Image (tube, rainbow, N blue to C red):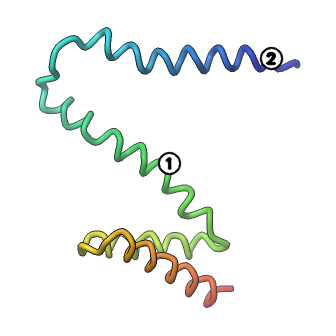
Amino acid sequence: MKHDIYVYLLVMSCVTLAIRILPLTLIRRQVKSRFWRSFLYYVPYVTLAVMTFPAIVEATQIPLAGALAMVGGIALAWAGASLFQVSAACCVIVFAAEFLFC
C-alpha cells in the first residue's frame, strides 16, 4: 500500500478550511442562545486542557508524579497563586515524587 503525502495534505487543507469557513458562512447574526454562547465560550479552554492533560501525565518518568503535580497545581491555582508559583511548585512536586518513588 503506497501512501501519497499530497492526498493527506489536500484532505487536511480541506478539513481546516471547512472548520474555519463554515461558521462564517452559516452563522450570519449574533448567537443569542444562552446554551450556545456558553458552549462557545468554553471551547478554547477545553481544547487547551485536552491537549495539555496527556502531556502532564506522560512527560514525567512516573505518571503518578505528573498526576500529583497536576493536582497540586490545580489546588494552588484555585487558591489564587500566580502562574510562576504554580509552575515552580509543580516542578518541585515532580522532583520530590520521582525522588521518593524511584
Q: Residue at x 32, y 9 (%)?
A: 25
Q: Quadrant of residue 82?
A: bottom left
Q: Quadrant of residue 40?
A: top left
67 left or right, relative to 78: right
Task: Examine the rendered structure and indicate whether residue 8 appears above or below residue 97.
Answer: above
| Depth order, front residue of 25/101 | 25
Q: Position of residue 101 (x, y in %)?
A: 63, 86
* Identity of the residue furthest to the front in this view: 84
Write down the residue under mark 1. Answer: 51
The C terminus, quarter of image:
bottom right
Give SS at disc 2. Answer: loop
20 left or right, relative to 9: left
The label number, if any, that marks residue 85 in the structure image: none
Q: Residue at x 37, y 45 (%)?
A: 46
62 left or right, relative to 54: right
* Identity of the residue furthest to the right in this view: 1
Q: Are marks 2 and 1 in contact (CB under 8 Å)?
A: no
Give SS at disc 1. Answer: helix
Q: Residue flagged by tag 2: what amino acid is it? A: Asp
The label number, if any, that marks residue 4 in the structure image: 2
Q: Residue flagged by tag 1: what amino acid is it? A: Met
Task: Examine the rendered structure and indicate whether residue 1 appears above or below residue 80.
Answer: above
Q: Position of residue 35 (x, y in %)?
A: 17, 32
